[in-house]
Image: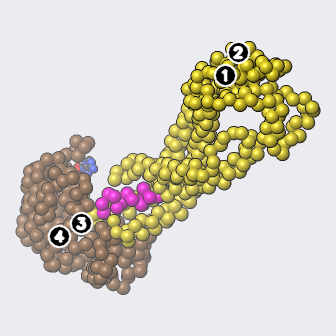
Chain colours: A brown, B yellow
Amino acid sequence: MIHMSEVSKVYENGSSALNNINIDIEKGEFVFLVGSSGAGKSTFIKMIFREVLPSKGQLIINGRNIMTMKEEEVPYLRRGLGIVFQDYRLLPDKNVYENVAFAMQVIEAPRREMQKRVNSVLELVGLRDKLKSLPSQLSGGEQQRVAIARAIVNSPMIVIADEPTGNLDPDTSWEIMKIFERINKSGTTIVMATHDKTIVDAMKKRVIAIEDGCIIRDEVKGAYGYED
Amino acid sequence: MKIRTWEYFIREVFVSLKRNSWMTFASISTVALSLLILGLFLIIVLNLNNMATSLESQVQINVYLKDELSDKKMEDIGQKIKKLPGVEEIKFVSKKEAMERFKERLGDQQTLLTALGESNPLPNAFEVKLRAPEQVKAAANLINEYEGVENAKFGQDIIDQLFELTKMIRIFGFIIIVFLALATIFIISNTIRLTVFARRKEIGIMKYVGATDWFIRWPFLMEGMVLGLLGSAVATFILRNSYGAVVAKIYDTLTFLPLIPEQPFLNNVSILMVVVGTAIGALGSTISLKRFMKV
Ligand SMILES: Nc1ncnc2c1ncn2[C@@H]1O[C@H](COP(=O)(O)OP(=O)(O)OP(=O)(O)O)[C@@H](O)[C@H]1O
Ligand SMILES: [Mg+2]
C-alpha cells in the first residue's frame, strides 16, 4: 500500500522536514502518526498524496511510483486516496449532499451510482437527516463527518487524515474516531497524524513516532508514549 | 468528457459571469470595441486594395485630344494609335458623347451641370483597349508624345496612390490592432483571475479528490471564450448593420467607386471577427490560469 525507503524531504528554503524514512504500511492497517509540533507529520501525509514531492528516496503508493509519476497521473493517484483535513474544507455554498456528491461529479462517476453511494456514505457517518443543511448550519463534528463522507465516497484504498480531531472536543473526537474505525473495518487503510494522546493510547493501533524528521518508534498496538 | 460534465461547465460559466457582472460587462465592451476597430480596418484596407486592383486590371488608355484639331488630324492620330503593338480596339468619343455619358453618370445630380451653362469643357478623346495590362504603360508613353494629344491617361498615379494608402493604413491599423488585442487579453485575463480567486477553495478540493487539470481548466477557458464570443457578436452586429448603410451612401454620391459588394465579403469578415474574438478570450483565460492556478 505505502512503501517508503530512504525518503528525505528538504524544503526549498532549506529546512529539513524528513530524514531517511523507511516504512511499509499494508492494506487494512490503522496507523497513528505522532510527534511534537514540527516533527514532520504533515510532510509525511502530504507526500502520500503528492502535495509534496520527496527530495530523495523511493515512495510507492497503491503501486504507483511517486518519484517518477507524471503530473497528469496525480489525479488518478488521488482517486485512490481519501484525504481529511483538520479544517474540514467544505464548500460553504453547497449543502451536505452536494458537498459529498461533488467529489464524484468531478471525477465523472456515473450518475446512477452517485445517488446511491452518497446516501450510503452519509448513512455511515450518521448524517442521513441533514442532507439539505449548509456547512454553516452544522457543528464542527458534523462538518468533519461530511468531510469524511466526501473522502470515502469514491471508495479509496487509503484514507489519510491530518489531525482530523484537532478542532474538536473529546466527546466529538471519539465519535469521529468510531467512524474511522468503522471505515477501517471494511478493509480501508488509515493513516492519521494526531496530537490526541487519549485516543492513541485507548485505541491500541500501530503507532509511528516521528521526531525531528526521523522515525524514533514504530509499534504495533502502541501508545502515544510521552507528554507534549 | 461526458455531456453531463459539459452541462456542469456551462452552468459554472454563467454563474461566474453573473457573479462578476461588472467585469463581464467591461470585458465584453472591450472585446466589442477592439473587434469593431479590427473589422473597420479590414473593410477599409480590403476595399482600397480592391479598388486599386480593379483599376490596375483595366487595359484602357484614355487619349484626350487638344481642342480645335481638324477632323483629318484626328483621323491621323487614330490611325497611328491603331498600328501600335498590343492595341486591340480603338474608339472615338466626341465632346458631345462625353458630355452625354457624364450626364448619365451623374444621375439625379444634374443640377451640378447648370453651372456650366451651354459650354462643354470635355475634350474629344480616343478610348484605346489593349490586349494585356503590361502593355498599357509603354503605349501610353508613346501616345503622349504625339502631336495634337493633350495627354494619355491610364490611371497609374491613382493606382500607385491607392496602394500607398493601403500600405500606410495597413501598418497603422496593425499597430492599433495589436495594441487593442493586448488590452483585450489583459482585461479578460483579469476577469478570469477574479473567477479563479472566487473559486480557489473549490479548485483546491477538486484537486484533492482527483479531478484532472483539464476538468478544472475547462470552465475558466469557456468563460473567457464566452466573453470573447459575446464581444465579437456585438461588434459584428454593429458592423453588419452599418456597412450596408455606408455602402449605399457611397454608391449614392460616388457611383464609380468599385466597393466590394456586401456578400459574401461581410460574412467572411464577421466569421474572422468571431474567431479572433473567441481566440482572444481563450488566450486571456489561459494566461490567468497559468499565473494564478498552476493548472
Ligand atoms: N512549505 C514548507 N516550506 C518550508 N518548510 C516547511 C514547509 N512545511 C513545513 N516545513 C517545515 O518542515 C518541518 C516539518 O513540518 P510539518 O508541518 O511536517 O510538521 P508537523 O509534524 O505536521 O507539525 P504540527 O504538529 O505542528 O502540524 C518544520 O520544521 C516546518 O517548519
Ligand atoms: Mg502538521
User: From mark 4 to mark 2, how far is it between C-alphas?
Assistant: 100 Å
User: From mark 2 to mark 3, how far is it between C-alphas?
Assistant: 92 Å
| Three-letter code, disc 1 | Ile
Q: Which residue is mark 4?
A: A157
Residue at 52% of width from left, 38% of height from top? B178
Q: Which residues are magenta?
A: B211-223
- The answer for which chain carries disc 2 is B
Q: Nearer the viewer, mark 3 or mark 4?
A: 3
Q: Which residue is mark 2?
A: B146
Mark 1 and mark 3 residues within 8 Å of each other at the beta carbon? no
| Three-letter code, disc 4 | Met
Q: Position of residue B43 (x, y in %)?
A: 60, 43
Q: Nearer the viewer, mark 4 or mark 2?
A: 2
Q: For the residue labelled by badge 4, is the local secondary structure a helix, a strand or a loop?
A: loop
- The answer for which chain carries disc 4 is A
Residue B81: assigned label: 1
